Amino acid sequence: MPHLPTLISDLALILITAAITTLIFKKLKQPLVLGYIIAGFLISPHISFLPTVAEEQNIQIWAEIGVIFLLFSLGLEFSFKKLVRVGGSSSITAIFEIVCITSMGFITGKLLGWKTMDCLFLGGMLASSSTTIIIRAFDELGIKSKHYVKTVFGVLVVEDIVVILLMVLLSTIAVTKHVEGFEMTKTVGKLGFFLILWFLMGIFIIPTLLKRAKKLLDEEVCLILSIGLCLGMVFLATKVGFSAELGAFIMGSILAETTSAERIEHIFQPVKDLFGAIFFVSIGMMINPAVIVEYGWIVLIVTLLVVFGKFITTTIGAVFSGQPLKQAVEVGMSMAQIGEFAFIVATLGMSLGVISDFLFPVAVGASAITTFSTPYMIKYSDNFYKIIEKIVPQKWQAMINTYSARTDNAKSESETWKLIKNTIITIVINVILVLSIIILCSQVLLPLLSQTIPGILPEMITLFAGLLLSAPFLWALMFKIPNYITGSELINNETYDRKKLLVLEITRLILAILLIGYLSDICFGTKIAVLVIVPISFILLFIFRKNLKKIYKLIEKRFIFNLNAREIAAAEKDAPIMNLKNRLRSHDPNMSDWDVHLIDLQTPQHAEYIGRTLKELQWREKFGINVVYVKRGEQMIYSPGPDVKIMPFDNVGVFATDDILEKFKPEFYAEHAHEIPDVEVEDIVVEKICIYEDSTLFGKSISNSQIRETTGGMVVAVERNNNRMLTPSPDLVFQEFDVVWIVGEKKRLKDIVK
């Protein structure tokens, strides 16, 4: 009998159990993640009456791959540019909430007498909310169109990236055993350096590669290439001292900026689902029910901390960011749970061996409870706001609303600060690029040349290559100004603060000197660097500044094009709607209290009102909504008149308040009551019948025969006296000995054939 490897039998057990439990959870309309965890618990060694895996070590390897692919998929959905687009309101809310709840988690652990690592990881586990649970709750409650939902999604985006950074910091602290300020600062600086470098190089190279290979990228090649890039970045991240999860997330976020992002995300989905299931099942296998019972009171404490702590801190953060009180409460009620990242953080701590065994079951228990409580908190957020409205003094409410209005109308930043901010970004980017070139030349090129070429030649080649490659970026570091301003405007415009700009220019010059000196010192020592190489380099940079400017502009143009390629393609498709939304965006501070906004709704295929005009529907009279546009394919109908009909899959732009939309949407999404028959292609047949004098069809026209109405069939041809008529007229009358061809469902055509 052939031997079956335990890895295959274990994998079969995992997937079969996961499939059964997820079917049950789908029927109960509960999160699949919870189903996977319960599946793992059922086949764990703690349940004696069910089979369990033979080798847990093999499953852990699969689970590690699962984490990598989960983070890669999250990066595909994320993209760094989303962090910029979410706006200050969501960013302030998220950062305030994360800092507070992480600190509260750390303090709670200390009060319970835990060791420092347990406290740190507890804070990290509480930092993120569950995107999956929140979206599912919004879908089930039908409130995704509400105004505050945009803020919630923005907060989730910021949370994702911050938790990724927390994971890197926690793993570094766990390995180095250092929690001192200097080590933390060093870690953050190193992380920032590599994040920016990887993002710059990835955006410059990968979209261009995908574009040029577009004709060769079928689904198979695209999948292999995306997984290869993911694992390549994982290898690179671990080589420089970071976690594999960070590398996967970074590559996903880079690919998210390409025009192939949706395609990669689609073809990668089955891979993500497979390994994600294995990962969450492996989490369930680590749950010890005895530990959960033993630490049940800690589970309760952590659950209360999550529910009340995240609600309070998120609400306060939303108020600080300028949200009205009602919207702030709704955002806070939506975020009161911990997400899948808590499991990943806990797994990281266990794999590094730095946290206690009880911490993981505590996270699972708290997550399970908050998973079930979240939909109810979101559902009753309006009721809870009414209670708060009665408790909070009117004076405080007026202050909050006034602060919100002032935040919306805050004046734009000064021209000097805008220039300084853009210049600092230029400095940071180009310092990182030049420094990376220096590190590459000194640690890779120089040792390689020294092994094969004798004498001083390796140092000369390294110095020349380093200066040549970094020359455009050194020019930008010293001379580049933002593209929206010219040199003459900068000199002649009196609105700029000359002293601040002078300090900035001197700083740029000093940084360039230090970078050139650093490379020169590596190759030839400090004395030659200061007296010879640095002065000559500056003279050459000044002489060839125009040529270097052209080269840098070409590099910058390519980078910006790659960075915005996906948005450009989407903007060309959705330009009419976006322009209209911008024109309708209100600048009246009082409008924020109304929750009035433009929302795009897609007409269901079988809606009850299909084919009826706006005049017949009377939506404006019934609900008080305004239909601003109707988009049908590529056709855009602005300010549609009363005679415009609504057709299947039309995009209807509706301008109304949240309360009105909640009343309107049930009618908009209502479909025909009768079920549409599920007919397979194989059931559709062509039947031939002959008309005789005693036939029920004899003497009737096609339209009066009721063939379509009674059987769903269609007369496609009629043969009469050896003459064949394709697509006969509906007025054609059946005569004796006519041969009629009818296309329809085989079962329903039986009576006619008889």
Image: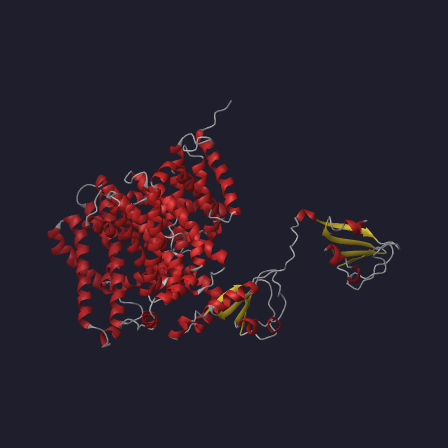
Residue 290 screen position, x and y as percent: 37, 36
Residue 290 seen: yes
Residue 516 screen position, x and y as percent: 19, 55
Q: Residue at x 31, y 68 (%)?
A: 483
Residue 281 screen position, x and y as percent: 43, 40
In the image shown, does 291 or 462 lie closer to the viewer?
291
Residue 580 screen position, x and y as percent: 47, 71
Name the residue furthest top.
1
- Quarter of the image where one finds residue 413: bottom left
In the image shown, does 45 or 716 lie closer to the viewer?
45
In the image shown, does 625 or 218 lie closer to the viewer?
625
**Colouring scheme, one of rainbow, by chain, secondary structure, one colour:** secondary structure
Residue 211 seen: no
Side of 696 where 564 appears, left or right: left
Q: In the rendered view, would you say 311 is above or below 578?
A: above
Side of 422 where 712 appears, left or right: right
